Amino acid sequence: MRAVDIIQKKRDGGELSREEIAFLVQGYSRGEIPDYQMSAWAMAVYFQGMNARETGDLTLEMAMSGDQVDLSPIAGIKVDKHSTGGVGDKTTVVLAPLVASAGVPVAKMSGRGLGHTGGTLDKLESISGLTVEMDQSRFFAQVGEIGVAVIGQSGNITPADKKLYALRDVTATVDSIPLIASSVMSKKIAAGADAIVLDVKTGSGAFMKTLNDSIALAKAMVDIGTQLGRHTVAVISDMDQPLGYGIGNALEVREGIDTLRGSGPADLTEVCLILGSQMLVLGGKAKDTDEARSILKARLEDGSALAKLKALVTAQGGDASQIDDPAKLPAASRQVEVKAAAEGHIEAIQAEEIGIAAMLLGAGRETKESQIDLAVGIVLAKKVGDAVSEGETLAVLHLNDASEAKVKEAESKVLEAYRITSQPVTPAPLVYAIVTKEGVTRF
């Protein structure tokens, strides 16, 4: 078997066998297939695509390229949640304790952010003393004891995917649905969950900008999960404006705490209830999403979801008093208000521009080596559909030592992100579709 023959076959629109895909992935992982041949193959896939069976085989090979976590020692159905990312997306901070409080074990392996703001691990590390590093035995024990743990991914989870993604990033082959889907799902499969709920974002602040592309990606990932024996559901949710009001690590944790208290932003609360309901159904704790939603709302109202977050923080060495008093979380030394230049109604907020503005203040990483300032970020004062007067505050920049040039650039980004119209505006729906192995349900 030769790499060049496999490249040519895919270039000409052929269907690759399981053996051919295994040959490529294993050979590339071992350094036997050079970057230039794998780049050519990725470009062939970019133009010719892969069918569901090929994509599933690619996913499994990448999952098998490194460590695979066996969660069977943990009792119950383990349900994982993955978001394709977005601005202000702090759903794991809410969902992990909320779902665990309803009896579904959450053994969550998360990553760090590169871009707008930190990832889930960075957000949680806003809580003093909290560690996201632990060995597998302690990880299992914590989930067994309190029902939830959130830790960093093993350095040897899906090494083939890491190597291939780095190559795709510099060869203009990132935007390929089979390659995106297999990249995401290989990590989920290797992490050992029995079932998976995917939050696929769509809109200006999402990786997939259009609804059709988002549904196509969701279908590809659900097909992979189904083929590999994992119950998988995808929720297509809106990212045409940031989720909630806070963008930045400690700011997002604070908003997550508010949500667990029952006083969080309506959009964040609703998205978490929708995702959490799917997790409870897959976890066998509810017969349908209506029953699951009732259970989750009861956990918010009786305080058990917030108590579960405190248990998580305590178990992982964090200062649980910061959950009782979020004012103890890291706070920026200075605030700058961004004012509206005209009156009217907020028609749109370009989420990606808001995310870039937060990164300029230090809330995210421009490079892998960048240091995040956990205290800084942006708090929106207006969302889509809100009325605004000229000179009224649109958003507040929370900053520490950012240069004046960066502050001015961030302020400009925020102003550019807001589009104001004279006519009343109805916000877009929070969820557009649910994708299961049975098909797509649009709302």
Image: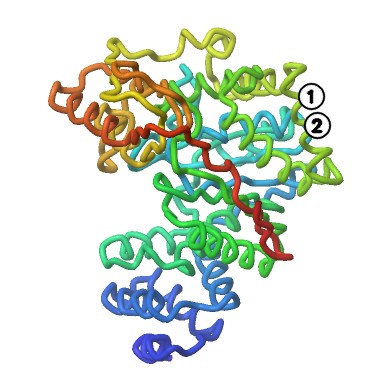
Residue at 26% x, 62% y is 170
Residue 345 falls in image quadrant = top left
User: In this rendering, is residue 158 above or below 389?
Assistant: below
For residue 331, the mark is none
User: Image quadrant of residue 286?
Assistant: top right
Left or right placement of residue 268 versus residue 288 in this view: left
Residue 237: x %, y % from top left: 56, 46
Residue name at image x 64 percent, y 22 percent? 260
Q: Give neighbour class at mark 1: few <14, some 14-19, many 20+ (Cα, 10 Å).
A: some
Query: SS at mark 1?
Result: helix
The x and y percentages for residue 140 are 67, 38
Residue at x 33% of width, y 33% of height:
418
Calculate the distance from the C-alpha at mark 2 to the C-alpha at mark 1. Answer: 6 Å
Amino acid type shown at disc 1: Ala
Residue ranking furthest to the front: 423
Res. 165 image quadrant = bottom left
In this image, 337 relative to 15: left or right?
A: left
Residue farthest left in this picture: 405
Q: Amino acid at mark 2?
A: Ser
> With 400 as the anchor, is 313 left or right in this view?
right
Position above or below: 202 against 8: above
Q: Position of residue 44 (x, y in %)?
A: 37, 80
Q: How many marks?
A: 2
Give the residue number, with chain letter if any, for mark 1. 298
Within-10-Å neighbours for mark 2: few <14, some 14–19, many 20+ = few
Foreground of the two, 206 or 340: 340
Q: Mark 2 = which residue? A: 294
Horizontal arrangement in the rendering, residue 7 relative to residue 144 (left or right): left
| Closer to the camera in the image, 211 or 400 | 211
* Mark 2 and mark 1 residues within 8 Å of each other at the beta carbon: yes
Colour mode of the rendering: rainbow
Circle 2 sits in a helix, a strand or a loop, which is it?
Answer: helix
